[in-house]
Image (tube, helix red, strand yellow):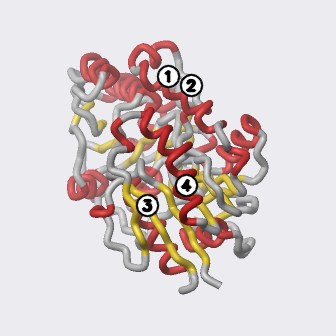
């Protein structure tokens, strides 16, 4: 008997989120047998070329949040009555009011579980309001879902605590490439500590900058910290540039393209990731891919993303002195990196897109946790 899967994702239009949508549709095409019809509700069908997928686009939805809310809670309801899907999979946080025997939502924004400090609210007031808004946005209609999907186990626990939902699955993103060797010669100087990230207040650039200042006073300019921001992106970025750009050991290198990022990873001796909030923390996975030493914030998301890895140290994300000590030990070739082992993830759990698609349509997957 023919079956129908609808994937709604009008908000995923560029960058990494668009890649997620394309990967999802490709996995659905690969995983689902021919009797399944796949329909994607998107911003613009011209962004896609997937065979076997029927696209329905709504190009005006992203013009405002009012249009987006109307789309999720009224337009999609009407569309679901017309399409009569067996499964409705919302790929971007919101639980639309639709009619379907099985409804699934993918929640990838961790901001509702973050408590900004006062100065962060002043640097980026929109983000502070956004955390409050998303806290209630998630709540709307969430119990209509058969399954809620998140990227990490700590977020699953937060959803269970805050919203009282028990049907939550964890789906880890993965990098589908073979590991690379560290191509940087150990004799090169200065040593490069690399932090690739956008200048959002929760990214916690200041703890690394303060650690760099402490270490410069101890050792001089025998190392370099590289930050992927320019200083003109936001109020927070301007603060960082104003305070730290005169330091001889801190470089503001700006946003990097793919080829430039490869070069930065090759030249870095250490990747530092002090962020205080992440859904996943892709640079951690990228650093593992390049075989780099990792200095990572000692927070739940980071432990899960690091997984099984033998070149990592966790530090207090609010203690620049501790971070400076670890950086100094790395410079002196005395850093005692630990072997970190990922605990098994409880079911339901999907280690890849194929397993996630099977969870979405209600098929069981093998109860073997991912071993990164």
Disc 4 target residue: 90
Mark 1 in CB contact with mark 2 (< 8 angstroms) = yes
Q: How far apart are labels 2 and 4 at the CA level?
A: 21 Å
Disc 2 target residue: 132
Q: How far apart are labels 3 and 4 at the CA level?
A: 11 Å
Q: Which part of the image, by quadrant, shows the C terminus?
A: bottom right
Residue found 43% across the figure and 60% down from its top: 21
Q: How far apart are labels 1 and 2 at the CA level?
A: 5 Å
Which of the marked residues, 2 or 4, is nearer the chain's N terminus? 4
Q: Is residue 310 rendered to the left or right of residue 263? A: right
Q: How far apart are labels 2 and 3 at the CA level?
A: 26 Å
Image location (x, y in percent) of residue 23: 44, 67
Q: Which mark is residue 21?
A: 3
Q: Which mark is residue 129?
A: 1
For residue 225, which quarter of the picture?
A: top left
Mark 2 in CB contact with mark 3 (< 8 angstroms) = no
């Amino acid at each position: 008997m023919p079956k129908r899967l609808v994937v709604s994702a009008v908000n995923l239009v560029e960058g990494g989120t668009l890649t997620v949508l394309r990967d999802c549709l490709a996995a659905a095409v690969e995983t689902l047998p021919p009797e399944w019809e796949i329909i994607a509700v998107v911003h613009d069908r011209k962004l896609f070329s997937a065979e076997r997928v029927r696209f329905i686009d709504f190009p005006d939805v992203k013009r405002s949040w009012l249009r987006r809310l109307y789309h999720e809670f009224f337009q999609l309801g009407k569309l679901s009555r017309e399409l009569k899907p067996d499964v409705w999979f919302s790929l971007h946080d919101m639980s639309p009011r639709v009619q379907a025997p099985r409804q699934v939502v993918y929640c990838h924004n961790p901001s509702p579980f973050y408590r900004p400090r006062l100065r962060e609210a002043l640097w980026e007031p929109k983000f502070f309001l956004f955390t409050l808004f998303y806290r209630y946005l998630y709540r709307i209609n969430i119990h209509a879902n058969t399954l809620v999907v998140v990227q990490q186990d700590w977020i699953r626990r937060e959803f269970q605590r805050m919203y009282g939902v028990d049907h939550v699955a964890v789906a880890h993103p993965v990098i589908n490439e073979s590991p690379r060797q560290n191509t940087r010669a150990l004799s090169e100087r200065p040593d490069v500590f690399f932090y690739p990230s956008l200048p959002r207040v929760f990214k916690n650039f200041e703890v690394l900058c303060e650690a760099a200042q402490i270490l410069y006073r101890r050792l001089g300019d025998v190392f370099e910290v590289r930050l992927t921001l320019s200083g003109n992106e936001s109020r927070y970025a301007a603060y960082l540039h104003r305070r730290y750009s005169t330091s001889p050991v801190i470089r503001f290198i700006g946003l990097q393209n793919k080829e430039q990022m490869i070069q930065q990873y090759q030249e870095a001796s250490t990747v530092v990731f002090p962020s205080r909030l992440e859904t996943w923390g892709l640079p951690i996975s990228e650093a593992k891919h390049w075989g780099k030493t990792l200095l990572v914030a000692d927070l739940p998301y980071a432990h899960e993303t690091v997984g099984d890895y033998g070149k990592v140290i966790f530090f207090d994300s609010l203690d620049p002195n501790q971070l400076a000590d670890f950086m100094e030990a790395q410079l002196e070739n005395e850093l005692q990196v630990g072997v970190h082992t990922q605990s098994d993830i409880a079911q339901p759990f999907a280690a890849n897109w194929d397993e996630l698609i099977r969870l979405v349509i209600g098929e069981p997957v093998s109860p073997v946790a991912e071993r990164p």
